[in-house]
């Protein structure tokens, strides 16, 4: 987004998502607070603005879009493809209070198939490309990672602890936890190897196949390899990275998870994944995959660079009539025009027009 405003960037994403048949989804600004209280681990920020409705219910300004979409849609045949451009309310990093943040993203819900997963990953990569920055899309797979964790003999209730270590690439703590659980060193080495994997599909896929064949579900592993191969065969070849430390909470996510990064921005500007586990938690039968683009982070580190504040500055005086001023403004036909009685201090303009006293320089 080097030369794009947040509004222009949003417009380009809306056009992209609409082109692939995703429909705009509108929602209320608030939900019952209980929805967020039950799913705090899913939220980026667990601080929520609350108020009491006229009927006594505790309500919240929405800090997240996906939870609201899951709650307010129903299971239907086929795949429902939606995108959103909504404001959420969060405490941002480094901020002392809540901010209203514009967030864009898309969700596919229903009978999710292999092509649908590929399409969402492709649109995530396209979204990163639209920033006009050098970007990387890091892709992982919680199903494959969970298979390796189960194969090592780690109990289900301890999965989150191990996944957290892998997400932090904290190999020392991962070793300590596994030793304390009595996990054989050979299995620990497999987990350490997965946690350390990072690179292009050409570099990493053969290693993944070698490590997980006979351990992971054969269909799941084959699907992962096919989807990554398809992404790697297109124009996104240079931006795809495999990184099994790009994880999310398994209480909500399963299958593919991914994060997008842009040069010069210290945190992810896009994140998403398959959240079938959350669908089950919310009594839904459908599968789901989607992502969000964090416009506030991107805009913070990508200020719009312009040479001018306004294309044309038109200065008029008391001798000019309204029709004369209007006619001159129409004749200027520029991208932007500012009409003033005098030149504002510090303003940058490409062209200056002055009118009045019968003279138009």
Image: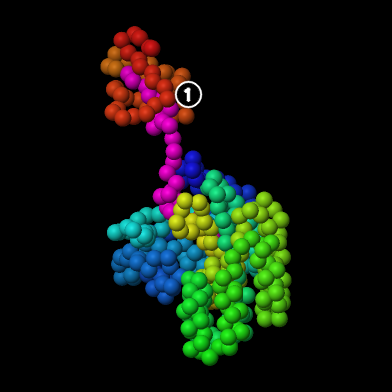
Task: Name the residue furthest bottom.
Answer: 182
Horizontal arrangement in the rendering, residue 275 relative to residue 91 (left or right): right
Q: Which quadrant of the view contains residue 199?
A: bottom right
- The residue that label 1 is drawn on is 333
How many other residues sit within 10 Å of disc 1, few (<14), some (14-19) or many (≥20)? few
Residue sitting at 37 percent across and 59 percent down?
A: 92
Horizontal arrangement in the rendering, residue 105 relative to residue 353 (left or right): right
x and y, in percent, of residue 338 in the image: 37, 27
Q: How is the image coloured?
A: rainbow
Image quarter (top left, top right, bottom left or bottom right) of the C terminus: top left
Asked whether residue 13 is in view, the answer is: no
Q: SS class of the residue under badge 1?
A: loop
Q: Nearer the viewer, residue 51 or 133?
A: 133
Residue sitting at 42 percent across and 25 percent down?
A: 350
x and y, in percent, of residue 6 in the image: 46, 46
Residue sitting at 59 percent across and 73 percent down?
A: 194
Q: Which quadrant of the view contains residue 97?
A: bottom left
Instruction: Reply above or below: 5 against 167.
Output: above
Residue sitting at 53 percent across and 47 percent down?
A: 133
Horizontal arrangement in the rendering, residue 13 relative to residue 115 (left or right): left
x and y, in percent, of residue 277 in the image: 55, 75
Instruction: Reply above or below: 112 against 184.
Output: above
x and y, in percent, of residue 207 in the image: 67, 70
Q: Nearer the viewer, residue 272 or 327?
A: 272
Bounds of the magenta segment: 291-316
């Amino acid at each position: 987004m080097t030369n794009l405003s947040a509004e222009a960037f949003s417009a380009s994403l809306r056009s992209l998502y609409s082109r692939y048949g995703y429909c705009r989804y509108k929602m209320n600004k608030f939900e019952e607070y209980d929805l967020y209280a039950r799913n705090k681990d899913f939220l980026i920020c667990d601080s929520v603005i609350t108020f009491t409705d006229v009927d006594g219910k505790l309500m919240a300004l929405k800090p997240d879009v996906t939870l609201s979409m899951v709650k307010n849609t129903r299971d239907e045949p086929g795949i429902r493809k939606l995108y959103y451009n909504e404001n959420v309310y969060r405490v941002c990093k480094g901020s002392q209070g809540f901010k209203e943040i514009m967030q864009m993203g898309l969700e596919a819900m229903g009978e999710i198939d292999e092509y649908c997963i590929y399409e969402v990953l492709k649109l995530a990569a396209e979204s990163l490309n639209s920033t006009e920055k050098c970007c990387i899309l890091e892709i992982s797979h919680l199903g494959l990672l969970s298979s390796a964790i189960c194969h090592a003999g780690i109990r289900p209730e301890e999965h989150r602890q191990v996944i957290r270590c892998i997400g932090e690439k904290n190999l020392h703590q991962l070793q300590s936890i596994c030793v304390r659980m009595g996990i054989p060193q050979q299995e620990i080495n497999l987990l350490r190897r997965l946690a350390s994997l990072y690179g292009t599909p050409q570099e990493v896929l053969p290693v993944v196949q070698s490590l997980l064949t006979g351990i992971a579900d054969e269909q799941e592993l084959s699907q992962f390899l096919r989807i990554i191969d398809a992404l790697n065969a297109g124009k996104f070849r240079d931006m795809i990275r495999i990184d099994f430390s790009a994880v999310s909470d398994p209480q909500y996510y399963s299958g593919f998870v991914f994060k997008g990064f842009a040069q010069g921005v210290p945190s992810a500007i896009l994140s998403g994944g398959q959240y079938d586990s959350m669908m089950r938690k919310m009594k839904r039968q459908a599968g789901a995959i989607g992502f969000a683009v964090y416009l506030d982070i991107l805009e913070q580190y990508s200020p719009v660079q312009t040479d001018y504040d306004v294309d044309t500055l038109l200065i008029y005086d008391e001798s000019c009539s309204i029709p004369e001023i209007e006619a001159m403004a129409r004749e200027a036909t520029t991208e932007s025009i500012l009409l003033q009685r005098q030149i504002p201090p510090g303003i940058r303009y490409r062209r200056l027009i002055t009118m009045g006293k019968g003279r138009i320089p």
